Image (cartoon, grey):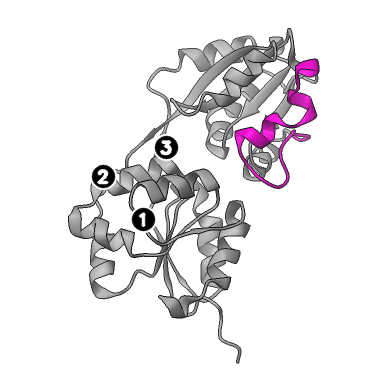
């Protein structure tokens, strides 16, 4: 029988809990043990007034951008509770996971990148060019804080942009004891990191010995920006994969584990 590519490997999945299942299942199907250890906890925003105001004037927007599946899950029910999705409102998403989340709520036809999934790529699409957005209102549904590139660029292109925080991100309440125990017992072979913010939380929760273990462990990341941040934090074995879960699992399955 052919040996599965991740047989005997213990791989940490650090996506938020609601988004961790697919990658964990892929790792298990490839023979590995998936250790779900979310580095971001997702919760409703502390202040819901901006979301309530956006819902009340949803018909005034020409374009609604959802940054993540969490942005969909924490905003769309409130929008659809008021009325049907406006026929004139174009939905847009940064990634295909967010497109699927929109579709699960009955909102299809989302504008989204098909290869690289980030704000830069979304901004390259025709629906976000100045000819389409100048003089029109754009809603960006996102977590609290985050990059301003999308909003700033659309404003430069003449759009009136509202950034609507519809969920909050915070460090996990649990400490890193499980990871430290696994490192010490040799039951942690790799981590998958899909958020620079989550990576910073991880580094902050580790002591010196934990950071040394992290630096020596293969870390698989799906975006160049995360790879650069990881290297800046002292990680020495950063593996840049293709985008999304599909890219991460391909990177894991084709990695030369013998060098580990």
22 and 145: which one is in front?
Answer: 145
Tell me whether circle 3 and circle 2 mark residues in contact (CB < 8 Å): no
Residue 233 image offset from top left, x and y in percent: 34, 47
Q: Which mark is residue 235?
A: 1
| Quarter of the figure that contains the N terminus | bottom right
Q: Position of residue 121 (x, y in %)?
A: 67, 36
Asked if the residue at tag 1 contacts the one at tag 3, i.e. Cβ–Cβ closer than 8 Å, the answer is no
The picture quadrant where one finds residue 22 is: bottom right
- The residue mark sitting in front, 3 or 1, is 1
Residue at 31 percent of width and 59 percent of height: 214
Left or right: 162 in relation to 182: right
Mark 1 and mark 2: Cα distance apart in space = 13 Å
Q: Is residue 240 magenta?
A: no
Closer to us: mark 3 or mark 2?
Answer: 2
First reached walking from the N terminus: tag 1 or tag 2 = 2
Q: CA distance from mark 3 to mark 2?
A: 18 Å
Whether 5 is drawn above or below 193: the answer is below
**Residue where numbered disc 2 is placed:** 204
- Mark 3, secondary structure of its residue: strand
As displayed, is residue 93 above or below residue 184? above
Residue placed most toward the observer, 233 or 111: 233
Q: Identify the mark at residue 42; answer none if there is no mark.
A: 3
Magenta residues (range): 108-132
Badge 2, how many Cα within 10 Å: few under 14, some, many 20+?
few
Q: Is residue 34 left or right of residue 117?
A: left
Q: Position of residue 126 (x, y in %)?
A: 79, 28
Image quarter of the C terminus = bottom left
Q: CA distance from mark 3 to mark 1?
A: 26 Å
Q: Residue furthest bottom?
A: 1
Q: Secondary structure at mark 1?
A: loop
- Residue at 19% over, 60% down: 209
**Rendered residue at 57%/39% (across/down):** 69
């Amino acid at each position: 029988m052919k040996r599965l590519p991740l047989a005997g490997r213990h791989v940490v999945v650090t996506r938020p809990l609601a988004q961790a299942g697919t990658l964990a299942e892929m790792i298990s199907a490839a023979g590995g043990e998936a250790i779900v250890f979310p580095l971001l906890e997702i919760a409703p925003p502390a202040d819901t007034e901006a979301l309530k105001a956006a819902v009340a004037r949803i018909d005034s927007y020409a374009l609604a951008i959802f940054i993540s599946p969490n942005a969909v899950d924490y905003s769309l029910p409130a929008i659809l509770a008021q009325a049907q999705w406006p026929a004139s409102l174009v939905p847009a998403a940064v990634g295909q996971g967010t497109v699927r989340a929109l579709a699960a709520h009955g909102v299809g036809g989302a504008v989204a990148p098909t290869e690289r999934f980030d704000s830069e790529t979304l901004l390259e699409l025709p629906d976000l060019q100045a000819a389409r957005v100048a003089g029109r209102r754009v809603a960006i549904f996102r977590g609290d804080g985050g990059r301003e590139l999308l909003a700033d660029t659309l404003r430069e292109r003449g759009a009136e942009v509202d950034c609507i925080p519809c969920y909050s991100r915070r460090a996990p309440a649990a400490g890193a004891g499980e990871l430290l125990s696994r490192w010490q017992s040799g039951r942690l072979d790799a981590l998958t990191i899909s958020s620079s913010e989550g990576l910073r939380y991880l580094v902050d929760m580790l002591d010196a010995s934990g950071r040394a273990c992290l630096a020596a462990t293969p870390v698989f990341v799906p975006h160049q920006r995360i790879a650069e941040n990881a290297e800046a934090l002292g990680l020495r074995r950063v593996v840049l994969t293709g985008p999304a879960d599909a890219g991460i699992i391909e990177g894991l399955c084709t990695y030369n584990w013998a060098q580990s």
